[in-house]
Image (spheres, rainbow, N blue to C red):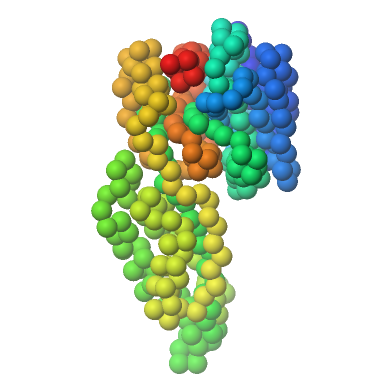
Amino acid sequence: MSTLLELTCELIRRPSVTPDDAGCQVLIAERLVRAGFRVEHLPYGGVANLWAAHGQGGPVLCLLGHTDVVPAGPREAWASDPFVPEVRDGFLYGRGAADMKGSVAAFVLALEAFVAAHPEHPGTVALLLTSDEEGDAIDGVRRVAERFRAEGRRIDFCLVGEPSSAARLGDVVRIGRRGSLTGTMTVHGIQGHVAYPDKALNPIHAALPALAALAARQWDSEPYPDFPPTSFQIANFTAGTGASNVIPGTATVQFNLRYSPHWTADALVAEIEDVFARHGVRADIAWHRSGEPFHTREGRLREAVRGVLIERLAVRPDENTGGGTSDGRFIAPLGAEVVELGPVNASIHKIDERVALAELEALPALYRDIAERVLLG
């Protein structure tokens, strides 16, 4: 068993369901200390965060990942125990194999190899890990980034190990992500009998015209380069007592916007609240700002990632901003170029999550080469 496979399996054996790190970061920190890294544990609110750095000054290249995983679901649905890694037919199976304990293990080996080959390298190379990426992402990288900003600590380049690839390793890299804004709205009406609608106020009827207008709207006046269009989606709509003859007194609607850099969360909040006001909807809305959009334009990191993939894998990646969100959204506001490169994402969050062994074994060299191009030129 290779060193990389052994470390990945050791991480999978730790059932680190958000926000429990289950000892993953301690294991990694001990390895990196032996390699000469300075380690800081930065816990917040029950979330484990690890910063391990080697070198001094700038530029600073950060490899960013998470040790937490989503719940496994019904274990009987898996072909093997999700927290007992198993190799079958050229794949490693287990929760977190692709998202993203394989990348985290590859980061560790890449960093060990990089500093062994270049002990006096210019700048700083670092690893940042959290156990709150799959959850609310409140006390994870968001809090670490706030601390770094307050302390004047810089990150110039950030390589995220999220599973970006679609069909084969390196065919897709992310150069940004849309912002995410969630609203949970309580619509106020007056409960009554369905036979006497004049004596009641149906909150469903009150909300539907405004929601229909928001869902049908074209939000971006023009396309934003490299970004899918802004979208409004209703995720949940609940109301009623269960009886067919009762007009409900309240309705609860949850919706989400994934938005391009044409918008900010504050601008969207103001726009949506204005739409509901113009339609006469009486409602309270609780907003959750998951993160603003970010976009990495052509620069040293994109050039390094593209060059390494072409040279090592003969793949010219599709560089886009698709998918959901990542913790890169918290690092980009520090002024960093952010690119995401990781294994194929076809099985992430699914039963029988897996990563191809050949692609897993290719990752450390890719990450090391990228670090050399960024820091050594």
User: Could you tell me residue 297's position as x and y percent?
Assistant: 36, 36
The foreground one among 249 and 273 is: 273
Does residue 97 sit above or below 288 in this rendering? above
At 46% across and 21% down in the image, what residue appears? 374
Which residue is at the far left?
222
Q: Is residue 348 visible?
A: yes
> Which of the image's four quarters has the N terminus?
top right
Quarter of the figure with residue 257: bottom left
Q: Position of residue 323 (x, y in %)?
A: 41, 41
Q: Quadrant of the C terminus?
A: top left
Q: Position of residue 339 (x, y in %)?
A: 44, 31
Residue at image position (46%, 34%) is: 338
Q: Looking at this view, is 279 or 78 the one in front?
A: 279
Q: Quadrant of residue 218?
A: bottom left
Horizontal side, residue 163 vs residue 120: left or right: left
Residue 168 seen by the camera: no
Q: Please state if 302 lies on the left or on the right of 97 as rendered.
A: left
Residue, x 67% and y 35% (percent of image)? 49
Query: Against 35, is 171 above or below?
Result: below
Q: Position of residue 369 (x, y in %)?
A: 46, 14
Numbered circles on residues, count: 0
Q: Residue at x 39, y 78 (%)?
A: 278
